[in-house]
Amino acid sequence: MKLPINENFHLRLTNPDDAEETFAVVDRNREYLRQWMPWVDGVQSSDAIRQHLDSLQAGIHDCPEFVLVYHGKIVGRLGFHRIDEQNRNTSVGYWLDAGQQGQGLMTMAVKAAVDYAIHTRKLHRVVLMAAVDNLASRAIPERLGFQQEGIARDGERLYDHFVDLAVYSILEPEWSARSAE
């Protein structure tokens, strides 16, 4: 599945063939990503990514993950952590190559993902969490009209310490009203 954004940018469901290119992006951004992502040290080869992608493709969990493809190259990932069909909600996580930041790519990607969650998957609530000090990541839900619900104190373990997470959400009626503007 592909979610087109513009002629140079789209989201595509990830697959095991993406492992090498994704690993290369992670590896060259290792120091940057490690500031915010607790999984970076566990990704030491493309095999680690391939194993994760194999489990996604096997359908073990309902957690769609997309690669961000900009000018034909993978520049990041965006994924739904878990889709809860019973309660019609999900949460979204993402990362982007440091060299591609500041162009609005992740804002456009999150917008496309929320459209998919609400309009295609018929979900009611989308949650996004970001470390309170990760101002660039927090700006995305704020730009897209998410409401900050609060702070999850020590909400994530980041290697040798815990970080507080800002918790944002948007509901289907709020998203639909924004889309109609």
Image: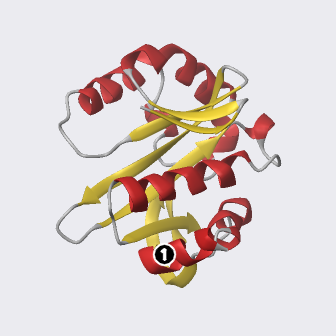
The answer to whether residue 167 is visible is no
The residue lying toward the viewer, choosing from 91 and 85, is 85
Q: Give the mark count.
A: 1
Residue 51 pos. (x, y %): 31, 23
Other residues around mark 1 within 10 Å, as few (<14) / some (14–19) / many (≥20): some
Q: Quadrant of residue 178?
A: bottom right
Q: Quadrant of residue 42?
A: top left
| Quadrant of the rendering where the N terminus is positioned | top left
The residue lying furthest to the right in this view is 102
Residue in the image at 51% along x and 79% along y: 174
Q: How is the image coloured?
A: secondary structure
Q: Quadrant of residue 127?
A: bottom left
Relative to 47, 23 lies left or right: right
Relative to 109, 103 lies left or right: right
Query: Under tag 1, what secondary structure?
Result: strand
| Quadrant of the rendering where the C terminus is positioned | bottom right
Relative to 120, 142 lies left or right: right
Instruction: From the image, tell me which residue sits under label 1.
Output: 169
The residue lying furthest to the bottom in this view is 150
Residue in the image at 49% along x and 58% along y: 114
Residue in the image at 48% along x and 75% along y: 169
Residue 105 pos. (x, y %): 71, 45
The answer to whether residue 180 is visible is yes
> Against 174, is 102 above or below?
above
> Against 66, is 129 above or below?
below
Mark 1 residue type: Ser
> Against 174, is 15 above or below?
above
Residue 146 pos. (x, y %): 57, 75
Residue 99 pos. (x, y %): 80, 35
Residue in the image at 17% along x and 67% along y: 86
